[in-house]
Image (cartoon, grey):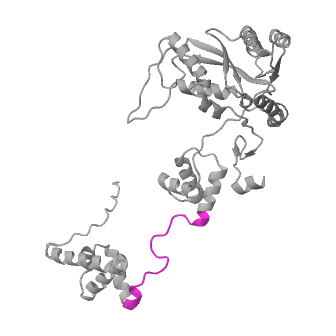
């Protein structure tokens, strides 16, 4: 069975003998639009033509309107005076697809859900409210309620939120205050592993997508770093094999020589090679205090932010020589007290990401709600 063709939208064709009259009507409507809405100007012209007993199709062609409009107007003229025809009724015209109440319900569902694209929200609206809405219309609706697309954060599955807060309040923050006043030297330590050629793809601005050459990824530059909280100096021990307790012991000796005469405190994670007997005994001999953050709490080790900064500096750059690759990393690390000191200063401060202010919105998702200005003043 053949499919029915959709009706094409009506096109009003002006007959040859009406071309001059059509031009006059256009000018009359433009003149009347100076004193009234264009809808009423067209309606007035149509009333005059109906009174002259013209056909609906001819009137529609001359006035640039739909035949249905003329037909409805002719019916109304049978029982309504012209004075009422020349009034635009309040609430007439195309009705909006979603009223204020439905918009509010849609926004509440968006806030409670975990939608990652406009298409998902449009599908939700179609299923829940039986409304077909385009992605651009969804975008306008979200902007109307100040809803933006925000990058999601990660919450370690086994992290103890209360333990993190207790560690920060009772241990970490007091040490930061002492380091700022010069009472002690506070360092954050961790190892980072830089694989040449495959870990640092980034983004480019342009009309077309760019491709960067990559290597097999078998050459790795390992850096054990210690970041001074106050001065932002980074001490390193490097190799291209593995980071073990031997490298940690070398670092302890370097720090003892560099900060001789000062109280040294190291904030470390719970890696086995940092908690072994060799490291603990040497730290005790050198009078260096080792403090280990709670398990699954990388957010409390500020050097993680510095490693993220270093890797960002390496993105979109190609290296095919391992010595050049290592030299580039060493240069970026050294710039923490040089050309990039201002950027590192903003990264490393007293503020630490904690998760005790999150509100659970579903089984696996949490939300961090910012305080309003009024709440900040009363706090």
Q: Name the quadrant containing residue 129.
A: bottom right
Residue 286 percent coordinates (x, y): 82, 12
Q: In this rendering, does residue 58 appear at all?
A: no
Q: Is residue 170 left or right of residue 339?
A: right
User: Principal SS element in the magenta part?
Assistant: loop
Q: Nearer the viewer, residue 351 or 28?
A: 351
Q: In this rendering, does residue 252 appear at all?
A: yes
Q: Name the quadrant containing residue 191.
A: top right
Q: For the point 60% across and 32% down, which residue is it?
A: 342
Q: For the point 40% across and 35% down, which residue is it?
A: 206
Residue 101 percent coordinates (x, y): 61, 65
Q: Nearer the viewer, residue 126 or 133?
A: 133
Residue 379 percent coordinates (x, y): 78, 52
In magenta segment, residue 229: no
Span colored in magenta: 80-102
Q: Nearer the viewer, residue 263 or 148?
A: 263
Does 95 appear above or below 347? below
Q: Residue furthest left?
A: 17
Residue 277 percent coordinates (x, y): 83, 10
Does 268 appear above or below 30? above
In magenta segment, residue 95: yes
**Quadrant location of the N terminus?**
bottom left
Q: Please state the total of marks drawn on the protein image.
A: 0
Does 105 appear above or below 82? above
Q: Nearer the viewer, residue 231 or 321?
A: 231
């Amino acid at each position: 069975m053949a499919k029915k063709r959709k009706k094409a939208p009506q096109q009003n064709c002006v007959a040859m003998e009406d071309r001059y009259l059509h031009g006059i009507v256009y000018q009359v409507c433009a003149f009347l639009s100076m004193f009234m809405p264009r809808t009423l100007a067209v309606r007035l012209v149509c009333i005059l033509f109906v009174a002259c007993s013209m056909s609906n199709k001819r009137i529609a062609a001359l006035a640039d309107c739909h035949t249905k409009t003329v037909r409805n107007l002719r019916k109304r003229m049978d029982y309504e005076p012209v004075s009422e025809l020349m009034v635009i009724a309040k609430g007439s015209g195309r009705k909006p697809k979603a009223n204020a109440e439905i918009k509010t319900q849609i926004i509440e569902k968006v806030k409670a859900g975990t939608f990652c694209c406009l298409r998902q929200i449009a599908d939700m609206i179609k299923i829940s409210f039986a409304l077909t809405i385009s992605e651009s219309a969804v975008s306008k609706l979200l902007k109307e309620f100040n809803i933006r697309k925000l990058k999601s954060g990660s919450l370690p599955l086994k992290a103890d939120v209360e333990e993190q807060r207790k560690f920060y309040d009772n241990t970490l923050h007091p040490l930061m205050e002492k380091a700022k006043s010069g009472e002690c030297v506070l360092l954050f330590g961790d190892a980072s592993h830089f694989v040449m050629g495959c870990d640092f793809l980034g983004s480019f601005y342009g009309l077309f997508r760019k491709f960067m050459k990559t290597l097999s990824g078998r050459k790795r530059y390992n850096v054990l770093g210690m970041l001074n909280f106050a001065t932002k100096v980074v001490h390193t021990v490097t190799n291209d094999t593995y980071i073990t307790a031997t490298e940690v012991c070398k670092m302890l000796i370097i720090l003892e020589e560099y900060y001789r005469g000062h109280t040294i405190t190291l904030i470390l994670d719970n890696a086995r090679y940092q908690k072994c007997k060799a490291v603990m005994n040497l730290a005790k001999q050198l009078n260096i205090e080792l403090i280990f953050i709670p398990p699954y709490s990388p957010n409390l080790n500020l050097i993680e932010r510095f490693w993220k900064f270093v890797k960002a500096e390496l993105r979109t750059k190609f290296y095919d020589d391992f010595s050049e690759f290592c030299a580039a990393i060493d240069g970026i690390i050294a710039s923490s007290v040089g050309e990039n000191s201002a950027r590192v200063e903003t990264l490393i401060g007293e503020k630490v990401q904690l998760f005790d202010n999150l509100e659970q919105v579903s089984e696996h998702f949490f939300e961090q709600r910012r305080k309003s200005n009024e709440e900040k003043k009363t706090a």
